[in-house]
Image: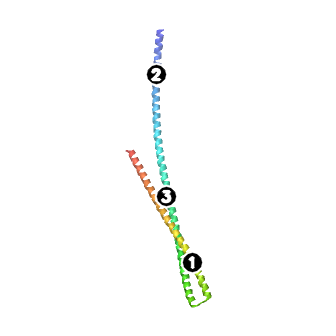
Amino acid sequence: MKTKLILTALALLPILATAQYNMNTVNRSMQMQQQQARNMNQQMNNMNQKWASDRQAYMQQQQMRNMMSHSLNKIEIAENKLSKEERNRKKLEEKAEKFNTDLKTKQDELAILENKSKNINDLELQKSIEKIKKEVSKVEEKLDAKNNEIETSSNKIQQYKNEVEASKLEKEKLEKKNEEERRLKKEAKELKKK
């Protein structure tokens, strides 16, 4: 029986040795797979972080472009309003000049009629003088209204000029900020290369 037991043990010895070797190989294989999985997971995390930072940089650039575009649009709109108001003021000044010449003509006509009335006491002449006086007062009212419109237009023009200047300053600030961000980004890339 001892011999059977010894023979069985000797027969099982290579099987047990092979099983233990296979178990060590499986353990090493599993450890290598786990290490590879960790490495892959780390690489994925690094890639995700890089993508997130790239996306954030892209979003900032996009936001900066939108702000610059908006700033340019504000400048264009303000400049368009300014030029339109300047044309409007020029038309108003031309009308005011026309009213001014009409007023001078009426005043000259009135002066002539008043000189005639001193020499002649005519009822028809007095009616003409009253009529011209009313016309002179109407022209003066129109001239005053146009002068008020010109003043209002001048105020609007000044306001639009201020808007244009403010928009240009805002654009310059955005450009400086954008240049600073580009410079910092470039420096960061150079540091990463080193």
In the rendered structure, which amino acid carries the disc numbered 1? Val
Q: Nearer the viewer, mark 3 or mark 2?
A: 3
Residue designated by label 1: 139
In the rendered structure, which amino acid carries the disc numbered 3? Ser
- Foreground residue among 80 and 16: 80
Colour mapping: rainbow
Residue designated by label 3: 71
Which residue corresponds to the image point at 50% horizontal and 64% vertical from the top-left? Answer: 159
Which residue corresponds to the image point at 48% horizontal and 53% vertical from the top-left? Answer: 64
- Foreground residue among 55 and 7: 55
The image shows a total of numbered marks equal to 3
Position in image of residue 29 (x %, y %): 46, 29
Vertical relation: 151 (above or below) 5: below
Circle 1 residues within 10 Å: few <14, some 14–19, many ≥20: many
Q: Secondary structure at mark 2?
A: helix
- Foreground residue among 45 and 89: 89
Q: Secondary structure at mark 1?
A: helix
Cα gap from disc 1 to disc 3, whole angstroms: 45 Å
Q: Nearer the viewer, mark 1 or mark 3?
A: 1
Position in image of residue 56 (x %, y %): 48, 47
Q: Quadrant of the C terminus?
A: top left
Vertical relation: 161 (above or below) 132: above
Cα gap from disc 3 to disc 2, whole angstroms: 75 Å
Residue designated by label 2: 20
Determine the residue located farthest toward the top in the rendered image: 1
